[in-house]
Image: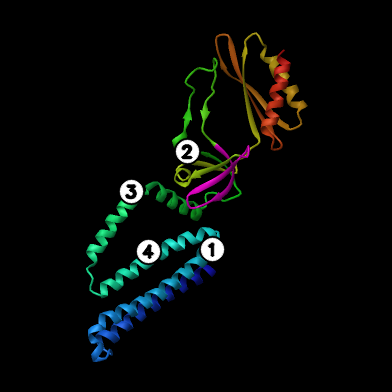
Amino acid sequence: MEKMGIVRQLWRIIITGLVLIAIVFFLTKIVSIIPQVLVKYTNLIQAVLLGIILYVLLRSILKALQKVLERRIHKKYARPLIFLVSVVGYFIILLAILALLGVNLSSIILGSAFAGAIVGLAAQQILSNFFSGILLIWSRPFVPGDYIEFNSWQYSYMLPSYPPKFLSRDEFRWRISGKVDDISMNYTTIIEDDGTVTKMPNSIVIQGATTVNPSRNKIQVRTELPKSIDYTKLKKDVEEIAASIKEITDWKIMVEEVGRETYLAKITMTIAGGDLEGTRGRFMESLLAAAK
């Protein structure tokens, strides 16, 4: 209901402005209430009156728009959007006034378009970040405080250039995991798990794949073993180690690959608590000790 009230307010402002503009033109052009000595300044008077009306109309629209934005997004994010709308609005008012004064607008518009193209090309990346920031702030795929895992097509899967070990599935994947600290017009700030502060350009963030507040209670361990080590014994060792670590609530083991002399076992565990890396490390230490 409140949203509908603001929309109705905007329509009232626009309709009132159009009615006032129509009255000005009716009184100055048709009825011609301007004194005879000032008739030659009719266009100037119309331009001044139109400028005042459009200025008041724009300020009223900006005020109503600010209320809408501040209900949806934070005040500091609403200000750049209001500034952008106001710049466009003042430019339109200027064009309307110049048109009434008899100025040829085609050269102005053409020159503005040419200058805009040059500025756009020169600041392409900056503008891309700016408008991407607007989209992130408005659409809110995630908000400050969310934990995200971010992957971008610019930094996709990368296989090692050398074989690390037989049957290995090792791979490097560029990924940022952490808490979203802030989203500005140009950068998204992420505090990673180790405390590193990373500022990602918004144009990169908008194109990436982002997992928001993922379930972070699963860990995997892959271990390559010679066939001389009995799989049944390995399974028993894993069961005993998992039972000795209270954070591990569930586990399973499977043979993932079989080679000529070795096999690759994958162990998946469910962890209660947030210290996934610490629990994984303790499990690996115990597994190494059991293998001796």
Report which quarter residue 242 is drawn in.
top right
As helix, strand or loop, the secondary structure at mark 3 comes to helix
Q: In the image, what residue type sits under mark 4? A: Val
Q: Is residue 173 left or right of residue 45?
A: right
Stretch in magenta: 176-195
Q: Position of residue 126 (x, y in %)?
A: 41, 49
As helix, strand or loop, the secondary structure at mark 1 comes to helix
Q: CA distance from mark 4 to mark 3?
A: 19 Å
* Residue appearing at x 26%, y 80% in the figure: 43
Q: Position of residue 161 (x, y in %)?
A: 47, 21
Kindly identify which residue carries mark 3. Answer: 121
* Mark carried by residue 152: 2
Report which quarter residue 217 is drawn in.
top right
- Residue 1 visible in the current orientation: no
Kindly identify which residue carries mark 4. Answer: 88
Residue 139 vs residue 200, the one in the foreground: 200
